[in-house]
């Protein structure tokens, strides 16, 4: 999968990309603004979205993307359950807590099988 990962903690993003997303093409951006630029330039299969970003909250991006067609799979990846739940209510297709990031592969596989999102 081509994955856009919106995460402002570069060391964490590097670590989990290497450990858990190595079989995917992953581009990491730290801001909503940069995510919007990437989303306009490429059809991503999935977007992993943290909640607390330097230029806003991940829910903003979820709300923008949830109503678009076509759209990628949207996955909430905050360390805080209530923030992931907020993004799920806003239209994210799945969630994977940073505390359980080892499960991201199963989350992605489940979305691919379900057909949720429009790029797969």
Image (tube, grey):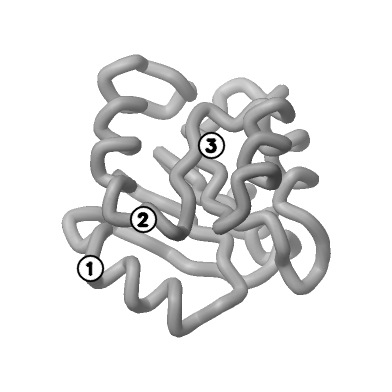
How many labels, in total? 3
Label 2 crowd bin: few (<14), some (14–19), many (20+), radius 10 Å: many
Q: Which residue is drawn at 36% across and 55% down?
A: 101
Q: Which residue is drawn at 28% across and 55% down?
A: 102
For marks 1 and 3, give the CA distance. 21 Å
Residue depth check, mark 1 versus mark 3: number of the one nearer the observer: 1
Quadrant location of the C terminus in the rendered image: top left
Q: Which residue is drawn at 42% across and 28% down?
A: 119
Which residue is most to the top? Answer: 114
Q: Do labels 1 and 3 touch, CB within 8 Å?
A: no
Q: Which residue is drawn at 17% across and 56% down?
A: 23
Q: Do labels 1 and 2 touch, CB within 8 Å?
A: yes
Give the residue pinned by disc 2: 101
Residue 11 horizontal/vertical position (percent)? 45, 84
Residue 32 horizontal/vertical position (percent)? 72, 60
Nearer-the-camera pick, 103 or 27: 103
**Does residue 43 lie above or below 4 as drawn?**
above
Nearer-the-camera pick, 89 or 6: 89
């Amino acid at each position: 999968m081509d994955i856009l990962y919106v995460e402002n903690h570069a060391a964490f993003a590097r670590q989990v990309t290497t450990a858990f997303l190595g079989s995917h093409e992953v581009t990491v951006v730290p801001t909503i603004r940069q995510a919007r630029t990437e989303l306009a330039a490429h059809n991503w299969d999935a977007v992993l979205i943290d909640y607390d970003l330097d230029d806003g909250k991940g829910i903003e991006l979820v709300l923008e993307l949830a109503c678009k067609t076509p759209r990628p799979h949207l996955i909430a990846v905050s360390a805080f359950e209530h923030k992931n739940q907020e993004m799920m209510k806003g239209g994210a297709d799945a969630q994977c807590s940073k505390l359980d990031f080892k499960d991201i592969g199963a989350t992605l596989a489940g979305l691919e099988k379900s057909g949720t999102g429009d790029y797969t």
